[in-house]
Image (cartoon, coloured by chain):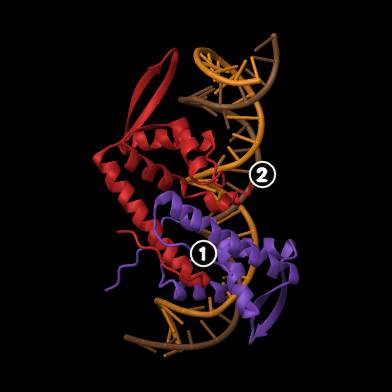
Chain colours: A purple, B red, C orange, D brown
Amino acid sequence: MYLCVMYSSELVKGTLKTIVLKLLSETEKMYGYEITQKVKELTDSKIVITEGALYPLLHQLEAEGVVTTEIVNIGKRVRKYYTLTQAGNERAKEKLYEFADFINTMNILLDLKPTVKYV
Amino acid sequence: MYLCVMYSSELVKGTLKTIVLKLLSETEKMYGYEITQKVKELTDSKIVITEGALYPLLHQLEAEGVVTTEIVNIGKRVRKYYTLTQAGNERAKEKLYEFADFINTMNILLDLKPTVKYV
DNA sequence: CAAAGATACATAAGAATATTATGTATAAGT
DNA sequence: ACTTATACATAATATTCTTATGTATCTTTG
């Protein structure tokens, strides 16, 4: 039996973009469903990205020129791959740096011990 | 000259309750304005709590029995002090633990180095 | 082989939480 | 006198997520 303790949604809220950009920055191209599964796997189901949150975000990123898309047919099904643009890579770096800095600030504020470095 | 780089609002969003509970858990009693100033000071103005966000949260916490209030007259002005109840202290511990755990998960996911312990 | 579950996309209604703006009022600094 | 700081509060709006719904194919399993 397995007790899955997810985080309160308000905590995860706001980190979705950072997570997606990070994954895309290290995998060249990914499709939506793949991203949800990867996050589930890496976090041991502590963070679960819902489709209602992910797809609108991906569309938004495309509209902003952060990613480009490529549609691939798998049998009769369709997959939509997302790839970071050069601007997207910059965006990913910025977001990761911001998050690392944010964690450091929160550690000080909440009096948690170590600091995190983003090189 | 001083360049104040605040975090994107979506990052800070969701951590407000944790921050407030933590401050109240170590200071016995605080009033709203005091909380905003303390956070500003501790984070070097990287996190600024707006009144429109804070006051509704404090009222909510009171309605939930997490804090009790005490109104104090300072001259002709009014101050509303907030104190954690016993349930509030539990809530603060839970929230801090959750946040520390969340940071650890995010560090793994985003491949940032150290982990944070909340004892 | 039929049903259930997994894969894969998408959007709309609603909830939650914050920002921005506004309002009131006193105290302090310039 | 005027501006800034202190101190509360709420309303309109914006953002971002959850939940629900919809479509469709592929795979596993009884």
In whole angstroms, how far apart are the C-alphas of marks 2 and 1? 40 Å
| Residue drawn where x is 63% and y is 87% of the image | A75
Q: Which residue is mark 1?
A: A50
For the point 46% across and 38% down, the residue is B38
Q: Chain of mark 2?
A: B
Q: Residue at x 52, y 33 (%)?
A: B51
| Left or right side of B101 for C11 | right
Which amino acid, mark 1?
Answer: Thr
Q: Give the vertical position of A40 relative to A50 (above or below).
A: below
Quarter containing the C terminus of chain B: bottom left
The three-letter code of the residue at mark 2 reads Tyr
Q: Which residue is mark 2?
A: B2
Percent position (x, y) of residue A19? 56, 66
- The quadrant the N terminus of chain B occupies is top right
- The quadrant where residue A98 appears: bottom right
Whether residue A13 is visible, yes or no, is no
Left of C20 or right of it: where is B64?
Answer: left
The foreground one among B110 and C18 is: B110
Q: State which chain disc 1 sits on.
A: A
Residue B6 seen? yes
- Between residues A109 and B71, which one lies in front from this camera angle? A109
The percent coordinates of residue A66 (x first, y second) are 71, 66
Q: In x, y percent, where is residue B14?
A: 48, 50
Same chain? Circles 2 and 1:
no
